[in-house]
Amino acid sequence: MKYEQSVAIYAWLLLVPFFWGGAFVAAEHLVTELPPITAATLRFGLAGVILMIIVFIQGKFDIGSVKKQWLPLLLMAITGIFGYNLFFFIGLNLTSAINGSLIVATSPVLLTLGARLEKCTLLVISNVG
């Protein structure tokens, strides 16, 4: 890999936490003006429109795949994307941006601990049975 490419990659990687951290502050200000359900709907709708434009420009839209998988796509969009945004805005309506970002930052640790506990539980159950 060329030096210029690696510098560009690290520059892009540095922008990720910048935008992620900025999302908490911006969302906290947004929920002072709009109800959380409205903010989540606007964020979901705007992101969906922007992503559809990108997909159409790249010419990668496959209507056949969408027709075949419309229900799983809809369920993932509602629970994964819209649901996350709704709870994100509700949470920031109840606490500060700093507390919200600290809670989200603990997710990888809690998921790892949960996976280990599940594995240990399965081992115990398999040895008992």
Image (tube, rainbow, N blue to C red):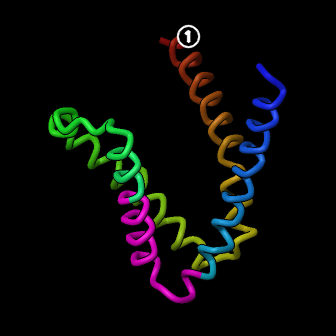
Residue 19 horizontal/vertical position (percent): 68, 59
* On-image quarter of the N terminus: top right
**Which one is in front, 110 or 108?**
108
In the figure, 70 relative to 104: above or below? Answer: above
**Residue found at x 78% / y 44%:** 11
Residue 54 horizontal/vertical position (percent): 41, 48
**Which one is in front, 116 or 65?**
65
* Helix, strand or loop at mark 1: helix
Q: Quadrant of residue 24?
A: bottom right
**Residue found at x 52% / y 18%:** 125
The residue stretch that appears in magenta: 30-49
> Viewed as shown, does residue 33 lie left or right of 97?
left
**Which one is in front, 7 or 13?**
7
Amino acid type for the residue under numbered disc 1: Asn
Question: What predominant SS class does the magenta segment belong to?
Answer: helix
Q: Residue furthest bottom?
A: 33
Residue 39 drawn in magenta: yes
**Residue found at x 47% / y 85%:** 34
| Residue designated by label 1 | 127
In the figure, 24 relative to 52: above or below? Answer: below
Label 1 neighbour load within 10 Å: few <14, some 14-19, many 20+: few
**Residue found at x 73% / y 53%:** 17
